[in-house]
Image (spheres, grey):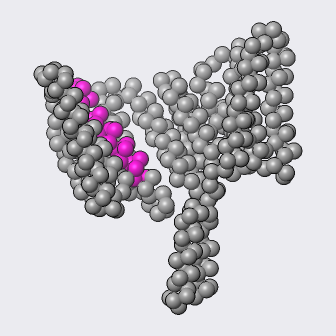
C-alpha cells in the first residue's frame, strides 16, 4: 500500500530526489521507484465543503418543513416521504456521479443523514419502542455499505462515531451479544483502514471504539465481582494503555497508538489514585498512595524518554493532589493562584522540551 503524504511534502521530496539524481547518488530508476511508494493525499476541496454544507442545509430545511406539517400527515404518507427522500437524493447522486462527482458525493452524504433520520421517524410513526440508542447502531451499520462503495474515510468515521453514541446510550443495559457485534464492527473497521482507507484519523476513532467496547465489557463483569469490579476494570484498562504503546503497527500509525495509549493509561492512572477505588478490597483504601508514587515515577520516566503527552498527564496528576490537599485548608483565591502558577510552569517546561529536543513524541 502506498503511503499518503501532503502535496507540499511530495513536492519537496521530489525535488530532493532530483537533486540526489543530479549528484549521481541515485539513478533515475531508483528515484522513480522511491516516488512510486507515495501517493499525494487529497487536500480540502472548496467544492466539497460547499456541497456538504449545502446538503446539510437542504436536509435541515426539508426536515423542518416536514416537521411543521408532520401532525397533519397520515402514517403511510409519512413513511412514503421518508422512502422518497432517501431514494430521491441517492438517485440524484447516481445521475451526477460521472458529470459532477463532488456534488454527487455531497448528495450521498445527505442520503446517509436522511437514512438516520428515517430510522428515528419510522420508530416514532409506528410506535416501535425499544431502546433509543439502538437507532444509532442501525444507522451506523446502514452507513457502512455507502462508505465502502465510496471508499470515504469521513463516512467511516461518521459510522464509528454512531457506534460510540450507541455504546454511550446503551452502556447500562447492553447485552453481551451486542458487545460482541460492536467488537466485530470495530474489527471490520480496522480491516477497512488497513486495506482501503489508510487514515490515521480513522484509526484514532476506531481505537476509541475498541476501548469503549472493552470498557463496557469489563464493567458488565462488575456483577460477578462486586468488591473488585471497578478496580479490576480500571487496572485492565490501565494495562491496555501500555499494551497500545507496544503493538507492532506500521510506522505511520505508531504516533496515533502512542497518543491513545498514553491517554488511556493516564486517565485510568488518575482514577486509580483515588482511595475510593481501592476501598473494600484486600489492598485497603490507602493503597492509592503507594500506587500514586509508582505511577508518578512512571510518568516521569515517559517524560524523560520524550513523551509530550505525559507532561499533560503530570499536570493533571499534580493538580489532582494539589486540589485534594489544599482546597479545604487554603483560601480559595490562593488555591487558584498557585494552581495557575503550576500550569504556567508546566506550560513553560512543555515549550522548553519541544524547543530543546525537537524529537518529542506523543
The quadrant where residue 305 appears: bottom left
Residue 231 falls inside the magenta stretch: no
Q: Which residue is drawn at 75% across and 30% down?
A: 58
Is 317 displayed left or right of 128 in the figure? left
Please report the bounds of the magenta region as a residue range: 257-284
Find the residue positioned furthest to the bottom.
24
The quadrant where residue 304 appears: bottom left
Is 349 displayed left or right of 170 in the figure? left
Find the residue positioned furthest to the top.
72
Q: In which quarter of the image is the N terminus?
A: bottom right
- The percent coordinates of residue 71 (x first, y second) are 77, 9
Residue 281 falls inside the magenta stretch: yes
Q: Residue at x 61, y 39 (%)?
A: 158
Task: Answer yes or no: is residue 126 visible.
Answer: no
Q: Which residue is drawn at 54% across and 66% down?
A: 9
- The percent coordinates of residue 338 (x first, y second) are 18, 33
Foreground pick, 207 / 104: 104
Foreground pick, 241 / 333: 333
Is 21 displayed left or right of 82 in the figure? left
- The percent coordinates of residue 256 (x first, y second) are 45, 52
Is 342 displayed left or right of 258 in the figure? left
Foreground pick, 155 / 238: 155
Amino acid at each position: 500500500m502506498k503511503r499518503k503524504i501532503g502535496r507540499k511534502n511530495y513536492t519537496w521530496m521530489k525535488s530532493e530526489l532530483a537533486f540526489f539524481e543530479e549528484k549521481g547518488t541515485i539513478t533515475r530508476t531508483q528515484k522513480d521507484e522511491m516516488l512510486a511508494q507515495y501517493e499525494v493525499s487529497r487536500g480540502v476541496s472548496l467544492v466539497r465543503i460547499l456541497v456538504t454544507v449545502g446538503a446539510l442545509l437542504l436536509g435541515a430545511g426539508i426536515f423542518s418543513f416536514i416537521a411543521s406539517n408532520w401532525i397533519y400527515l397520515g402514517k403511510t404518507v409519512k413513511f412514503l416521504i421518508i422512502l422518497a427522500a432517501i431514494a430521491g437524493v441517492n438517485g440524484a447522486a447516481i445521475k451526477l456521479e460521472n458529470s459532477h462527482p463532488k456534488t454527487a458525493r455531497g448528495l450521498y452524504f445527505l442520503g446517509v443523514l436522511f437514512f438516520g433520520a428515517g430510522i428515528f421517524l419510522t420508530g416514532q410513526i409506528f410506535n416501535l419502542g425499544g431502546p433509543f440508542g439502538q437507532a444509532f447502531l442501525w444507522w451506523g451499520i446502514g452507513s457502512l455499505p455507502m462508505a465502502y462503495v465510496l471508499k470515504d474515510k469521513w463516512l467511516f468515521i461518521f459510522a464509528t462515531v454512531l457506534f460510540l453514541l450507541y455504546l454511550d446510550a446503551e452502556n447500562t443495559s447492553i447485552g453481551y451479544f451486542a458487545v460482541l457485534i460492536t467488537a466485530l464492527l470495530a474489527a471490520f473497521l480496522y480491516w477497512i483502514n488497513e486495506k482501503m482507507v489508510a487514515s490515521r484519523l480513522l484509526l484514532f476513532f476506531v481505537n476509541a471504539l475498541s476501548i469503549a467496547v472493552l470498557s463496557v465489557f469489563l464493567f458488565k463483569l462488575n456483577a460477578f465481582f462486586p468488591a473488585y469490579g471497578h478496580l479490576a476494570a480500571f487496572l485492565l484498562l490501565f494495562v491496555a494503555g501500555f499494551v497500545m504503546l507496544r503493538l507492532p503497527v506500521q510506522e505511520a500509525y505508531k504516533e496515533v497508538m502512542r497518543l491513545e495509549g498514553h491517554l488511556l493509561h493516564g486517565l485510568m492512572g488518575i482514577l486509580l489514585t483515588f482511595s475510593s477505588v481501592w476501598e473494600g478490597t484486600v489492598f485497603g483504601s490507602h493503597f492509592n498512595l503507594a500506587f500514586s508514587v509508582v505511577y508518578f515515577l512512571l510518568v516521569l520516566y515517559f517524560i524523560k524518554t520524550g513523551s509530550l503527552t505525559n507532561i499533560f498527564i503530570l499536570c493533571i496528576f499534580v493538580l489532582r493532589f494539589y486540589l485534594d490537599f489544599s482546597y479545604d485548608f487554603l483560601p480559595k483565591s490562593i488555591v487558584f493562584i498557585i494552581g495557575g502558577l503550576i500550569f504556567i510552569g508546566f506550560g513553560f517546561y512543555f515549550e522548553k522540551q519541544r524547543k530543546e529536543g525537537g524529537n518529542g513524541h506523543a
